[in-house]
Image (cartoon, grey):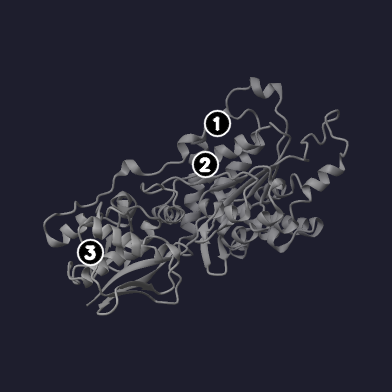
Amino acid sequence: MQANIKTVSFLGIKTIEINVQVQILNGLPSFTIVGLPDKAVAESRERIRAALFAMGIALPAQRITVNLAPADVQKEGTHYDLPIALAVLAAMEILSPEDIANCVAIGELSLNGDITSVVGVLSAAVFAKKNNHTLICPNVCAQEAVWSGEGGILAPTSLVNLINHFKGTQILPKITIDYTKAHAYRNNFGCFSEVKGQLVAKRALEVAAAGGHNVIMLGAPGVGKSLLASRVPGILPPMTSEESLEVTMIHSLAGRINSAGLIIDRPYRAPHHSASLPALVGGGINAKPGEISLAHRGVLFLDELPEFSRSSLEALRQPLETGNITISRANNHVTYPARIQLIAAMNPCRCGHLGHPGHECSQAPKCGKDYLNKISGPLLDRIDIFLDIPDVTVADFESEKSEQSETIKQRVTAAREIQLQRYKSKLIHTNAEAQGEELESLVDSKAKQLLYDCVDKGHISARGYYRIIKLARTLADLESNDTITVNHVSEAIAYRHTGR
């Protein structure tokens, strides 16, 4: 007796098809799983055996062989329980092989036969939809799967429900989108009007948000660096449907959406400086995404930047340049999207009072240089905006509230829409992602001459040269100007050199 069903294996947010092939032959009783299974997959035998026993079904006293093909792909996780169980039931002729022939199954079995949640359901749903297959997934993950498109989804609560559905004694309900279960990050963040003073910083962060540019803020403790960074998500435009799907798939693989629906607002991740390299970059046994990938299409805020380990900071180079990050382990080589907007904050020295007479430590000013030297030149070269954050004065506390985040957001959204139209044929979304050479022709002659002079005198690298052009392009977009003028280039140069 033989039976087949399809499931998936995860390579980042991509999925590859795995064929679960079950063969039951005469011989000594055994239950063998082959095809590079890890410990969790090998333990599926006992979970399946217990689940079937709870339903009153005993495995035959024959040799059961389960092959997970292709055999050269490492199989990890508990989501293979359900497809293996269905293939075994079909091989035992309890289910018809035709019922499961065009299905992709994913789910973990409990010992009583319930189907429990697993990670990566949205990725599996997208794969099934693309290949015109029916997806069978846990009921608790249904609202995650349905965002791939309504129809073609079976979401039973238990193995009994699924068997009854195939036998026609029970009909599983159709899964529809519950829009009340969409994730929203922005509700926890305040408004820019609550930040006292810091008008230059607010303008710079508006520019950064409009073009997806990276920012470093330098200032004494308590001047509002973290407060400013936390307000940035409130001025970012909503994600497109494609971006939402991509972000949700990453969070689904990381097991961080608790079986809820689509993520509709841009992520904001702020890991502590004690975070390890795998926590930031991603890794572990199953090569799960880290904080860099979880911030994809959103903001990654690193407070106390020099306090992060040197290896963690250097790991930022690849995603800041390419928009993805590759995790290489002995058994895994996985690439995750990581198109982030980096916002970092730091003190001028370890004590934080460099430049304040009477408050400086005994090591000043050497302590300041040593502190800043923890950040390498190649990483700094990938930063577009450097901000000196001044102390807040009494006059700032007495001043009226500044612009609301919603007003700033309207300008940012308008600038982002211009960029979407400009790059729609290139599948990129912001000026920060564009190739600088493409924008060079938009710089007028006077602005280009100013840029050449600064490159020669300021020893700006080729990367820095094109980053200035991209930043100037964002400034022009905020003014709905087709040409990059002297004013745009001079402001972009001022942002790039402030605080260095």
Identify the residue at image location x=74%, y=61%: 461
Dot 2 alpha-carbon crowd within 10 angstroms: few under 14, some 14 to 19, many 20 or more: many
Mark 1 belongs to which amino acid? Glu
Residue underneath mark 3:
58
User: Nearer the observer, disc 2 or disc 1?
Assistant: 2
Q: Nearer the viewer, residue 276 or 54?
A: 54
Q: Residue furthest left?
A: 169
Q: Of label 2 and label 3, which has the lower sequence position? A: 3
| Observer able to see residue 46 | yes
Q: Nearer the viewer, residue 28 or 458?
A: 28
Location of residue 359 with respect to 239 vertically, above or below = above
Dot 3 alpha-carbon crowd within 10 angstroms: few under 14, some 14 to 19, many 20 or more: few
Location of residue 408 with respect to 320 vertically, above or below = above
- Give coordinates of residue 156: x percent, y percent: 24, 54
**Which numbered tag is attached to residue 403?**
1
Q: Of label 1 and label 3, which has the lower sequence position? A: 3
Location of residue 2 with respect to 117 vertically, above or below = below
Q: Of label 2 and label 1, which has the lower sequence position? A: 2
Residue underneath mark 2:
233
Mark 3 belongs to which amino acid? Ala
- Give coordinates of residue 340: x percent, y percent: 56, 53
User: Nearer the observer, disc 2 or disc 3?
Assistant: 3
Q: What kind of element bears circle 3?
A: loop
Q: What kind of element bears circle 1?
A: loop
To which quarter of the image does residue 42 belong? bottom left
Mark 2 belongs to which amino acid? Pro
| Observer able to see residue 479 | no
Question: Mark 1 and mark 3: span between their CA atoms?
Answer: 69 Å
Please state if 374 lies on the left or on the right of 55 as rendered: right
Identify the residue at image location x=68%, y=49%: 308
